[in-house]
Image (cartoon, rainbow, N blue to C red):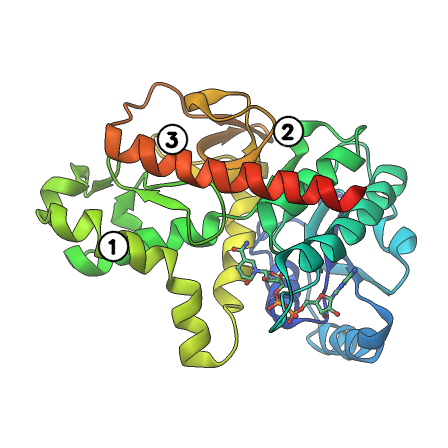
């Protein structure tokens, strides 16, 4: 059997962490033949809960799980990790200013960037999930200069999967028959779910749905607002779908995307599609041999251009806000 891969999950005692660690340990992230050692980090107030998660993982007697490191010490948790999934962060609480939340996350991601840089494996792949996901990933990238830019990404796969599911439901097909939607931009309500290049059973989505009014309005806002709809229904934010999408993100990144299809990932912009270089922006990407590349040459109409630029503008503003928190 292959050597075990070390996977770090920060915020592992939280909601997504609880679902995610079990999925990783059952092979949903790296495949059914890949043993894993789970590194779980949380903060001191969650230390007991983290212990409980470790106990449950032991009790599940999982064949692929070759070891567990559960710690509140960031250096210990980051030691030798090959993959890092960052769920830990500071959530926005009622009455808090955006700047205050950003400032807390800037200090968390600055510190965790340094720990990863010092202690993780040199080729460590990082997925940031904690909000503001794109900007937290950007901060991490800035403060971990020795980690290659291409190894730092953020999660927009949940939004991508939500878009696939909405189209599948509307056209009454299985979700696996819907391909190549795109989430452009920020993991926020300004994201742009684009179906102009997507297919349903190999037919263009616009033909299959045959309702542009729905596609240009309700579909977009349903995907953008899905997180809020889950909170309203569950009184808690998305957890199992976020964990499952994080597994999809890393699996495709490491093992490759199926031929002829792409996925959405928040990655650093190289200027493709006129997006300011250096932002962490969600693009359509294909993955091969452990690397991703942005799908090139897609035609962008005026409707899409406007929405892609608006979400880019929001990321530019978040970047400025993050910068101001450093002073
Ligand atoms: P929870 O509040 O349940 O869990 C977060 C955990 O992080 C807690 O156990 C907390 O103690 C821990 N934590 C806080 N600061 C830490 C630090 N400095 N180091 C290590 N751990 C720390 O949140 P949960 O529902 O699990 O969500 C996790 C994050 O994912 C949130 O920021 C949330 O907004 C974000 N989301 C992002 C999504 C995406 O698609 N990108 C979708 C789902 C989710 O909303």
Q: Is label 1 in contact with label 3 (beta carbons under 8 Å)?
A: no
What element does badge 3 sit on? loop
Relative depth, front residue between 23 and 303 = 303
Question: Residue 105: x and y, percent?
Answer: 72, 54
Query: Which residue in the structure is indicated by mark 2?
Result: 150
Where is residue 225 drawn, in percent x and y? 38, 61
Kind of element beneath mark 1: helix
The residue wearing badge 1 is 219
Residue placed most toward the observer, 54 or 96: 96
Tag 2, which secondary structure?
Answer: helix
Q: Which residue is mark 3?
A: 259
Whole-percent x, y for residue 112 in the image: 81, 48
Does mark 1's beta carbon lie closer than 8 Å to ligand 1?
Answer: no
**Quadrant position of residue 295:** top left
Q: Judge whether residue 255 can be spotted in this image.
A: no
Nearer-N-terminus badge (2/1): 2
Above/below status of 14 relative to 143: below
> From the viewer's perspective, is the residue at label 2 or at label 1 nearer?
1
Q: Is residue 188 positioned above or below 200 on the image?
A: below
Quarter where residue 68 is shown = bottom right
Q: Is 90 on the left or on the right of 317, as rendered?
A: right
Ligand 1 located in image quadrant:
bottom right
The residue lying at 60 percent from left, 52 percent from top is: 132
Position of residue 54 relative to residue 146, above or below, is: below
| Left or right side of 115 for 211 | left
At 46% from the left and 74% from the top, the residue drawn is 231
**Badge 3 residue CB within 8 Å of ligand 1:** no
């Amino acid at each position: 059997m292959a050597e075990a891969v070390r996977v770090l999950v920060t915020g592992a005692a939280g909601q997504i962490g609880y679902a995610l660690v079990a999925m990783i340990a059952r092979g949903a992230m790296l495949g059914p033949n890949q043993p894993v050692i789970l590194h779980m980090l949380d903060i001191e107030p969650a230390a007991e809960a983290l212990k409980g998660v470790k106990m449950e993982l032991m009790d599940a007697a999982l064949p692929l799980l070759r070891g567990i490191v559960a710690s509140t010490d960031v250096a210990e948790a980051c030691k030798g990790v090959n993959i890092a999934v960052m769920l830990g962060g500071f959530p926005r609480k009622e009455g808090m200013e955006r700047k205050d939340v950003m400032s807390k996350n800037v200090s968390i991601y600055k510190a965790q960037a340094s720990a990863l840089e010092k202690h993780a494996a040199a080729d460590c792949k990082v997925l940031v999930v904690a909000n503001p996901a794109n900007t937290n990933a950007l901060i991490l990238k800035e403060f971990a200069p020795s980690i290659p830019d291409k190894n730092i990404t953020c999660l927009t796969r949940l939004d991508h999967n939500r878009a696939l599911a909405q189209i599948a439901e509307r056209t009454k097909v299985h979700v696996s028959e819907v391909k190549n939607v795109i989430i452009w931009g920020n993991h926020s309500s300004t994201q742009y779910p684009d179906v102009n290049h997507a297919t349903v059973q190999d037919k263009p989505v616009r033909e299959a749905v045959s309702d542009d009014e729905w596609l240009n309005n309700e579909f977009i806002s349903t995907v953008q607002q899905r997180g809020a709809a889950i909170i309203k229904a569950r009184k808690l934010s998305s957890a199992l779908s976020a964990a499952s999408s994080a597994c999809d993100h890393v699996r495709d990144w490491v093992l490759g995307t199926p031929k002829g299809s792409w996925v959405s990932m928040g990655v650093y912009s190289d200027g493709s599609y006129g997006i300011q270089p250096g932002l962490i922006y969600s693009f359509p990407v294909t993955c091969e041999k452990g690397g991703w590349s942005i799908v090139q040459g897609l035609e962008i109409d005026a409707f899409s251009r406007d929405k892609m630029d608006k979400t880019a503008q929001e990321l530019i503003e978040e970047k400025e806000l993050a910068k101001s928190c450093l002073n």
